[in-house]
Image (tube, rainbow, N blue to C red):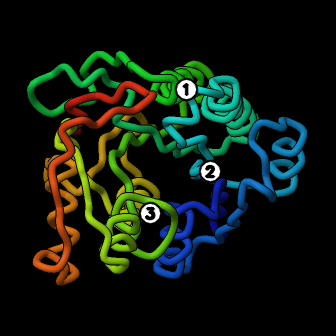
């Protein structure tokens, strides 16, 4: 019998990347739900759709991801990233659905010299990271059949508001670019993460637990901006300068490289 996969938060860059790769798995039926179509903070909505769906897997891409706004509205961040995930873990357990949840490098404080492993102690330093860690803990407490996949600096060249597309848009407009090198991480293509989820986790049936997934090359935001300009033939056409006075409302981990 054909297995069924529910994808929540389907209009985000990872949800859209999963949609592009879904045709690679003809033996699975995919049900893509945007946050407008399925609000994970509403338990009644989840109960209804899971009763009808008969899902074998749920890939949760629904999240409150605006790091700056989370500092101003922690209740909104925790509503989605913690309480919503708690709801999802509960219905997944009730309906025997394996939960695949996307988490973040921001569950770490950034003080480690090397790359973070899955065994390193979590210690988020901003509201976004704290809300995502709370979601992880709810899953671990409620639904044994789970995968928690932490990733970092996720971007899509086609979809969403992300660093890659912002740099390219400003380059096309001929704007000067001022970018910090105060943080180091691993930029990760949404398409790479989508393939990992579908090929390694779903089809490959990895053991349940926590995983780290990135495209693997550590760099600063400044390094990444240089790479984007090089890739698109803008390196000698745009003025890229190092921002020495970079300030944000949310504290950011200086090192969030994931092993």
User: Do residues under tags 1 and 3 come within 8 Å of each other at their CB atoms?
Assistant: no
- Taking the spot 68% from the left edge, 41% from the top edge, the residue there is 96
Quarter assignment of residue 208 = top left
* Front-most of residues 178 and 161: 178
x and y, in percent, of residue 143 in the image: 60, 29
Quarter assignment of residue 172 = bottom left
- Taking the spot 79% from the left edge, 57% from the top edge, the residue there is 36
Quarter assignment of residue 181 = top left
- Taking the spot 17% from the left edge, 62% from the top edge, the residue there is 240
Numbered circle sitting on residue 198: 3
Q: Is residue 64 above or below residue 255?
A: below
x and y, in percent, of residue 197 in the image: 42, 57
* Front-most of residues 243 and 258: 243
Distance between the alpha carbons at the discs numbered 1 and 3:
33 Å
Numbered circle sitting on residue 100: none
- One can see residue 259 in this view: no
Helix, strand or loop under label 1: helix
Q: Is residue 221 above or below residue 33?
A: above
The quadrant of the rendering that contains the N terminus is bottom right
Q: Is residue 188 above or below residue 88?
A: below
Distance between the alpha carbons at the discs numbered 2 and 3:
12 Å
* Front-most of residues 210 and 236: 236
Left or right placement of residue 197 versus residue 172 in this view? right
Q: Nearer the viewer, mark 1 or mark 3?
A: 1
Mark 3 crowdedness (10 Å alpha carbons): few <14, some 14-19, many ≥20: some
The quadrant of the rendering that contains the C terminus is top left
Mark 1 lies on residue: 71
Q: Nearer the viewer, mark 2 or mark 1?
A: 1
x and y, in percent, of residue 213 in the image: 30, 48
Distance between the alpha carbons at the discs numbered 2 and 1:
29 Å
Helix, strand or loop under label 3: helix
Mark 2 lies on residue: 58
């Amino acid at each position: 019998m054909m297995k069924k996969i529910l994808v929540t938060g389907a209009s985000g860059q990872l949800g859209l990347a999963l949609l592009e790769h879904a045709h690679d798995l003809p033996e699975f039926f995919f049900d893509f739900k945007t946050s407008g179509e399925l609000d994970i903070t509403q338990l009644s909505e989840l109960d209804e759709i899971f009763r009808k769906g008969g899902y074998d897997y749920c890939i949760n891409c629904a999240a409150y991801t605006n790091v700056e706004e989370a500092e101003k509205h922690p209740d909104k961040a925790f509503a989605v990233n913690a309480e919503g995930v708690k709801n999802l873990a509960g219905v997944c357990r009730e309906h025997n659905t394996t939960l695949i949840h996307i988490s973040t490098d921001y569950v770490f404080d950034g003080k480690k010299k090397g790359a973070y492993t899955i065994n390193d102690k979590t210690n988020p330093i901003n509201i976004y990271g704290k809300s995502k860690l709370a979601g992880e803990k709810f899953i671990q407490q409620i639904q044994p059949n789970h995968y928690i996949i932490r990733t970092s600096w996720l971007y899509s060249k086609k979809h969403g508001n992300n660093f890659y597309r912002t740099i390219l848009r400003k380059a096309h407009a001929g704007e000067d670019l001022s970018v910090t090198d105060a943080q180091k991480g691993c930029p990760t293509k949404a398409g790479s993460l989508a393939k990992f989820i579908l090929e390694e986790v779903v089809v490959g049936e990895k053991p349940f637990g926590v995983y780290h997934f990135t495209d693997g090359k550590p760099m600063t935001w400044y390094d990444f901006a240089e790479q984007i300009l090089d890739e698109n033939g803008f390196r000698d056409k745009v003025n890229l300068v190092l921002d020495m006075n970079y300030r944000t409302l949310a504290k950011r981990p200086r090192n969030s490289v994931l092993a």
